């Protein structure tokens, strides 16, 4: 299936589980093959739960990851998109990882999609991305607003960099990723087809 | 902390991971102590993954549960609310469990809150709950509409039974659970305090 799309979604201890789960699930519903990659916290006493096989998320939900992120083995060529969820502690681990910073730059250089949501947008700063439109959770706005064209829109598309604000904007973030990944007419159809069975309340603004 | 609230959220193989995660996370944000209980699928070849320690959800996300649901050991007195998420296969396992049916009836008899969402509402039918207002995912409406006062509202409150429709209505479902659990003025405050930092898009209708 040459047209199949694929995404790698990072996860760490402290990742916001709604942001991770809504994005992963919505992409899978759109036919995107998803894989989660666990980013170790180098400061954790146990090396970041690597042995447990799961990430302990921000509100205590434990999610089994598909692989541990290892820059020496990771194959960016296998993926069309890279997603960085929020959750203060998880996002700090990702933003502080030079391997993740390099991955973000590599994906964008190769014309692939990079999505960041909530505190995940801090990785745009640590990766030294060029000044461009961007949003984030309000709690980290002060760290970002002098470096980017900061927006308070729910989802901001800047070329292949797609950013969003928090758990409450994750559905439109994920649906925008679907549309962007498939492009043009197919993307709009995919978005509509995925959105319908989710049964959003009438007059939902996305 | 006498005022602390607690909830048990059922999970099974095939549970809709967004419905599980949004509800669990939102309740934790409201100060509700949450515990997930895994309902085994008696028809599964391996007895329902009990040994693995996690549930494989509807779109492939694997969630580590807090306990295996065992009717002989379960203490309803420890909880203020019981939540039954959707996802066709997971909801079928829950609806078909006589122990879960008994739990639903016990919780309601004791004046506790029971929440069902999506195909989770099928458990209202298998538990032989009295005819009352109820909603569900549209895909199971035909099985429910002759037995209940079927509604297409996003969230339906019928005494202590709170039902909802799908992933797209899980946020208002969870926020309604928060409000209902804490009651009156405190509940409305809790709902507002939890909702704010989630950063919903402007004009979101809940």
Image (spheres, coloured by chain):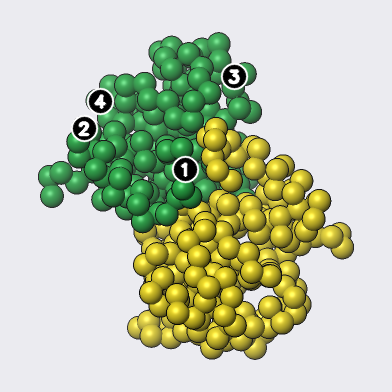
Chain colours: A green, B yellow
For discs 3 and 1, the disc positioned in front in the rendered view: 1
* Residues flagged by tags 2 and 1 on a common chain: yes
Eyeballing the image, is B88 above or below A149?
Answer: below
Q: Which residue is mark 3?
A: A143
Q: For mark 2, give the secondary structure.
A: helix
Q: Which residue is mark 1?
A: A203
Chain ID for label 1? A
Chain ID for label 4? A
Q: Which residue is mark 4?
A: A111
Chain ID for label 3? A
Query: Looking at the image, is mark 4 or mark 3 earlier in the sequence?
Result: 4
Q: Is residue A110 left or right of residue B176?
A: left
Query: Looking at the image, is mark 2 or mark 1 earlier in the sequence?
Result: 2
For discs 2 and 4, the disc positioned in front in the rendered view: 2
For discs 2 and 1, the disc positioned in front in the rendered view: 1
Chain ID for label 2? A
Front residue of this view, candidates B179 and A61: B179
* Residues flagged by tags 4 and 1 on a common chain: yes
Tell whether label 1 touches label 3 (CB within 8 Å).
no
**Label 2 neighbour load within 10 Å: few <14, some 14-19, many 20+:** few
Front residue of this view, candidates A102 and B157: B157
Q: Is residue B112 left or right of residue A164?
A: right
Q: Which residue is mark 2?
A: A184
Residues under labels 2 and 1: Cα distance? 24 Å
The quadrant holding residue A176 is: top left
Whether residue B185 is visible here, answered yes or no, is: yes
Residues under labels 3 and 1: Cα distance? 34 Å
* Residues flagged by tags 2 and 3 on a common chain: yes
């Amino acid at each position: 299936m040459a047209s199949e799309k694929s995404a790698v979604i990072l996860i760490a201890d402290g990742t916001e589980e709604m942001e991770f789960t809504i994005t992963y699930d919505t992409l899978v519903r759109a036919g995107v093959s998803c894989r989660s990659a666990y980013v170790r916290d180098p400061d954790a006493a146990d090396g970041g739960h690597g042995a447990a096989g799961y990430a302990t998320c921000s509100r205590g939900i434990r999610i089994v990851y598909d692989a541990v992120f290892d820059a020496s083995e990771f194959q960016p060529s296998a993926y069309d998109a890279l997603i960085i969820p929020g959750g203060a502690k998880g996002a700090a681990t990702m933003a502080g990882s030079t391997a993740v910073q390099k991955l973000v730059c590599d994906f964008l250089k190769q014309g692939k999609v990079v999505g960041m949501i909530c505190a995940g947008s801090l990785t745009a700063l640590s990766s030294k991305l060029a000044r461009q439109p961007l949003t984030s959770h309000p709690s980290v706005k002060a760290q970002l607003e002098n470096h980017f064209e900061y927006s308070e829109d729910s989802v901001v598309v800047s070329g292949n960099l797609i950013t969003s604000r928090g758990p409450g904007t994750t559905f439109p973030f994920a649906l925008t990723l679907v549309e962007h990944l498939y492009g043009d007419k197919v993307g709009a159809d995919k978005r509509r087809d995925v959105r319908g069975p989710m049964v959003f309340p009438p007059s939902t603004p996305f």
